[in-house]
């Protein structure tokens, strides 16, 4: 191969490289995706847990929705007021502090308080209990099964099984709601962090049946309703419910409850 052939080959290769560069440059301009700087800033402010507690597909989905005005600046339950304030500053709007909530397990039926009908030996997953006789070994068909489906889905290590029932660490909980969705018995709800008194039972059985199943189950006796000075308590389907908007935390309902089925979150003991 002579020198001229080498030069020609080099020129051809160089020309092809230039043409490819020009093509890629034009393609980049033609198919350029506009970046919303505000959306990027919002995404950077979000915690990045991608838990879905906000109702969107991860933090990027929420960031896009907030930037478009489809979601409020304080829509992230995990970030709370601090993140909401930061996003409000990015948007140039004032953001009210949202109410902090935490998960609460409406059941006290641990190994010492709830009775069982048989010994279960199988998959340790509450959601599998739909295929087990009676919905699980506990006599109360509404009680916490204690196999930790809620524990497995919590991204913040805020819920654990102790003595056969799930217990929430209020300080770690970030109200993402994953445990609420995971519980097949629908025993977990998000309540205000500063909730006063809450009924820690979900049994819908009549009193005599509940008493045979659990020593701390609500029997629907109505003493809490009769003694509440604010009319904040009602009994439906043999189980008491407390309206947190009306409750003043006087503790009378808790004092009058013969089964000790009413607790003050954070001060259960």
Image (cartoon, helix red, strand yellow):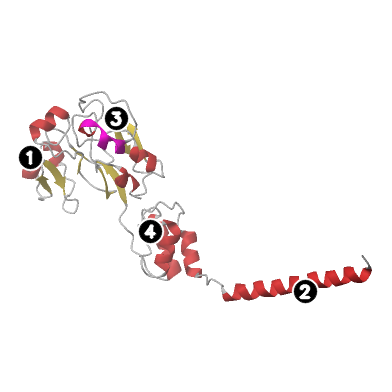
Q: Nearer the viewer, residue 126 or 38?
A: 126
Q: Nearer the viewer, residue 28 or 228?
A: 28
The image quadrant where one finds the N terminus is bottom right
In the structure shown, which secondary structural element does the residue marked by tag 2 occupy? Answer: helix
- Identify the mark at residue 223; answer none if there is no mark: 1
Q: What segment is highlighted magenta in the picture? A: 126-133
Most distant residue in the top direction: 119
In the structure shown, which secondary structural element does the residue marked by tag 4 occupy? Answer: loop
Around disc 2, counting alpha carbons within 10 Å, would you say few (fewer than 14), some (14 to 19), or many (20 or more)? few
**Marks 4/2: CA distance?**
49 Å
Residue 44 place in picture, x, y as percent: 49, 60
**Marks 2/1: CA distance?**
91 Å
Lower position in the chain sequence, tag 2 or tag 1: 2
Q: Nearer the viewer, residue 222 or 185?
A: 185
Most distant residue in the right direction: 2
Q: Nearer the viewer, mark 3 or mark 4?
A: 4
Lower position in the chain sequence, tag 3 or tag 2: 2
Q: On the image, which quarter does residue 172 sit in?
A: top left
Residue 114 place in picture, x, y as percent: 21, 28
**Marks 3/2: CA distance?**
74 Å
Q: Residue at x 10, y 45 (%)?
A: 236
- Identify the mark at residue 161; answer none if there is no mark: none
Lower position in the chain sequence, tag 3 or tag 4: 4
In the structure shown, which secondary structural element does the residue marked by tag 3 occupy? Answer: loop
Around disc 1, counting alpha carbons within 10 Å, would you say few (fewer than 14), some (14 to 19), or many (20 or more)? some
Q: Nearer the viewer, mark 4 or mark 1?
A: 4
Q: Residue at x 33, y 28 (%)?
A: 122
Name the residue tied to disc 2. 15
Lower position in the chain sequence, tag 1 or tag 3: 3
């Amino acid at each position: 191969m002579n020198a001229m052939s080498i030069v020609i080959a080099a020129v051809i290769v160089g020309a092809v490289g230039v043409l490819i560069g020009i093509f890629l440059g034009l393609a980049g301009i033609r198919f350029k995706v506009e970046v919303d700087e505000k959306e990027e800033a919002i995404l950077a402010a979000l915690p990045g847990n991608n838990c879905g507690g906000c109702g969107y597909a991860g933090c990027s989905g929420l960031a896009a929705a907030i930037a478009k005005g489809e979601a409020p600046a304080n829509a992230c339950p995990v970030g709370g007021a601090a993140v909401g304030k930061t996003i409000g500053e990015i948007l140039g709007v004032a953001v009210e502090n949202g109410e902090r909530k935490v998960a609460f397990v409406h059941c006290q039926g641990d190994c010492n308080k709830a009775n069982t009908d048989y010994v279960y030996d199988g998959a340790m997953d509450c959601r599998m209990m739909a295929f087990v006789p009676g919905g699980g070994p506990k006599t109360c068909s509404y009680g916490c099964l204690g196999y930790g489906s809620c524990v497995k889905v919590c991204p913040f290590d805020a819920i654990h099984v102790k003595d056969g029932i799930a217990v929430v660490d209020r300080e770690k909980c970030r109200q993402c709601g994953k445990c609420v969705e995971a519980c097949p018995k629908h025993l977990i709800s998000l309540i205000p962090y500063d909730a006063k008194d809450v009924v820690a039972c979900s049994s819908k059985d009549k009193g005599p049946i509940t008493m045979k199943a659990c020593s701390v189950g609500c029997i629907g006796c109505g003493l809490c309703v009769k003694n509440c000075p604010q009319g904040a308590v009602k009994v439906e389907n043999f189980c008491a419910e407390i309206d947190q908007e009306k409750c003043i935390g006087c503790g009378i309902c808790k004092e009058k409850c013969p089964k000790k089925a009413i607790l003050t979150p954070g001060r259960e003991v």
